[in-house]
Amino acid sequence: MGDMGRSLGLVLAVVLLLLLVGPARTLLFPGDNRQPAVDYRDQVTGFGQVAHTPALVPARLPSQWRANGADLTLSKQHGAHLHIGWGLPDDRYAGLDETDGDPATLLQQVLGHRGLAVTGTREVGGAQWQVRRSQRGETALTRTAGAVTVVVTGSASEAQLDLLAASLH
């Protein structure tokens, strides 16, 4: 019995050590699993180079907003598509999508068929935005600025979406 107890104690000590210092640490301390914010400058620069028009980018977002994804896709058929996503402090997210291509294609890709219908308009940050509802039931703000179509959407509150939209320059 004594040998079994010592063996079990040794195994438990090794498991505990691995839980405290290894990648499994997030099982015990999930708050420590904050990834560094994504740097989306290269995607924004690339969009400007291929679209021959600058992307609208946010300025002065709250420090709690963490960019967690950025992607630039190019298509001969649909043009350049820039996507930047943010994780918000209340487990919500906000996304920014831009294209120099066909606006209807972007709206369909990002919002689904339901998002093609405009449900209203409102002024945000001195610009007129169309209000839409995505296939998932999320609010979306859209507008065309020069040759670029912009979509702001996500599970964020309307105030958070307005903040993102107003910060674009």
Image (spheres, grey):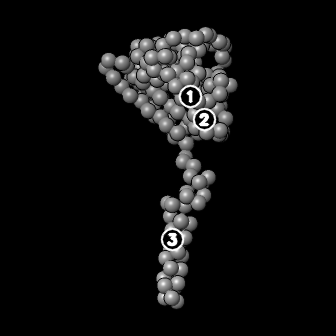
Q: Label 1 belongs to which residue?
A: 154
Residue lying at 65% horizontally and 38% vertically, measured from the top left:
90
Residue lying farthest left?
76
Crowd tier of the residue under label 3, counting other residues whose Cα lies within 10 Å: few below 14, some 14–19, many 20 or above: few
Q: Where is residue 84 in the image (x, y as percent from the top left)?
A: 50, 31
User: Could you tell me the amino acid type at mark 2?
Assistant: Arg
Which of 74/21 is in front?
A: 21
Q: Name the element at disc 2.
A: loop
Secondary element under disc 1, as helix, strand or loop, is strand
Decide which of 22, 52 is in the foreground and name it.
Answer: 22
User: Is residue 109 positioned above or below 35 on the image?
Assistant: above
The residue tagged 2 is 92
Image spot of residue 153 (x, y percent): 56, 25
**C-alpha gap between disc 3 and disc 1:** 40 Å
Would residue 107 be found to the left or right of residue 62 on screen?
left
On screen, residue 77 versus residue 124, left or right, reads: left
**Residue indicated by mark 3:** 15
Distance CA(mark 2)–CA(mark 1): 8 Å
Instruction: Give the quarter of the figure containing the C terminus.
Output: top right
